[in-house]
Image (cartoon, rainbow, N blue to C red):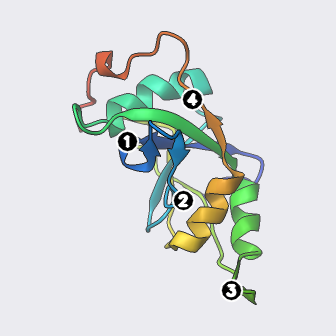
Amino acid sequence: MRLTREEQVVRAVCTEHYDSDSGRISPSLYEGKETSVSRLAVIPLAGQWPTLAATVQKLPGRRLEKLGELGVGQIEDIGANYTQNGNQAAVTLTVVNDQTPQNPAHAIIPEKITKGLSRVLRQATVIHDPPAGFDPERIPRAVPA
């Protein structure tokens, strides 16, 4: 099921996309095919932290550091208006439901996202810091069903 333009989604920002020394988030945050996101309409922002920590972390190496929020309409518009080297390079981007037993809010952007397009999506992303007292190391890892 394709999500409506009005929905908001979050992307987990883990250690491979985050430099804690500089606070910089990699422009390749959305790069690749079948990019995972999570729906705020299903699980509100506060509930996304433990849900995503349980599903994306692989401690001690991979930690959930931040969450990045974008609207589905923004994602679609950025793809439709994307230019590369001054030339129109529009990409049809969609966000579709892909719930899992571990994350009923899971969705994906199924289309392949290039590094250049990922950079534009990253620039539009609103970054959320973890809530006070959130300790990702205290979240048990979800076991696949």
Kind of residue sitting beneath label 4: Ile
Q: Which residue is mark 2?
A: 27
Kind of residue sitting beneath label 2: Pro
Label 2 and label 1: CA atoms lie apart by: 13 Å
Q: Which residue is mark 4?
A: 43
Mark 2 packing: few (<14 Cα in 10 Å), some, or many (20+)?
A: some
Q: Earlier in the sequence, mark 2 or mark 1?
A: 1
| CB within 8 Å, label 2 to label 1 | no
Residue 78 picture location, percent across and down: 73, 66
Kind of residue sitting beneath label 3: Asn
Quarter residue 27 falls in: bottom right
Label 3 and label 4: CA atoms lie apart by: 38 Å
Q: Residue furthest top?
A: 133
| CB within 8 Å, label 1 to label 3 | no
Residue drawn at point x = 50 percent, y = 54 percent: 26
Label 1 and label 3: CA atoms lie apart by: 30 Å
Q: Is residue 52 above or below residue 82?
A: above
Q: Is residue 28 above or below residue 71?
A: below
| CB within 8 Å, label 2 to label 4 | no
Q: Which residue is mark 1?
A: 15
Left or right of 105 in this view: 64: left
Q: Earlier in the sequence, mark 3 or mark 4?
A: 4
Q: Which residue is mark 3?
A: 85
Residue drawn at point x = 69 percent, y = 71 percent: 79
- Badge 4 element: loop
Nearer mark to the viewer, of 2 and 4: 2
Observer-nearest residue: 115 or 42? 115
